[in-house]
Amino acid sequence: MSGTVRVDAWLWAVRVYKTRSAATTACRAGHVRVNGERAKAAQPVRIGDELRVRISGFDRILVVKQLLTKRVGAPVAAEAVDERTPPREPVALLAQRDRGAGRPTKRERREIDRLRGRD
């Protein structure tokens, strides 16, 4: 048992989720994968395992460097994880018109087309 830890406990210990029950719920919902396979909450993780965790629509890729069973401080938690998540692409903000503002003018239409990339 010394070479493994439950996946939900490890995710909670390294501060990916605020509570262990939130980590368990994410496992049940299929948001956690260990080495490419869907993980149940009690599945053991070992050093070197790759975890893909879906949080708010984006995948975080984590590699286990150290096994933790208890929640630790942020500096210690950062040492236990090898973060391999690629940087997110910036999301372009779309122009929004006020409701009831009427049809856009010709100038506003050109600005909207330029923002949407329809030059």
Image (cartoon, grey):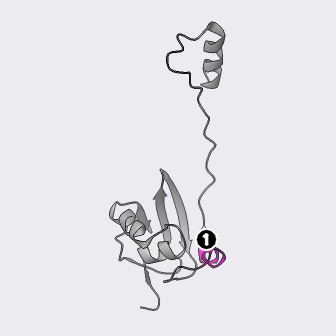
Residue in view at x 47 percent, y 62 percent: 53
Q: Which quadrant, please, contains the C terminus? A: top right
Residue 47 seen in this snapshot: yes
Q: Is residue 77 left or right of residue 59?
A: right
Q: Is residue 78 above or below residue 25?
A: below
Q: Which quadrant, please, contains the N terminus? A: bottom left
What type of secondary structure mainly makes up the magenta span? helix
Residue 37, image x, y percentages = 38, 66
Q: What residue type is labelled 1?
A: Asp
Q: Which residue lies furthest to the bottom in this view?
A: 2
Q: In this view, does 90 lie above or below 4?
A: above
Q: In this view, does 11 lie above or below 29?
A: below
Residue 90, image x, y percentages = 64, 43
Residue in view at x 54 percent, y 63 percent: 61
Segment tinted magenta in the rendering? 73-82
Q: Name the residue under label 1.
A: 82
Residue in view at x 52 percent, y 67 percent: 16
- Secondary-structure class at tag 1: strand
Q: Nearer the viewer, residue 71 or 92?
A: 71
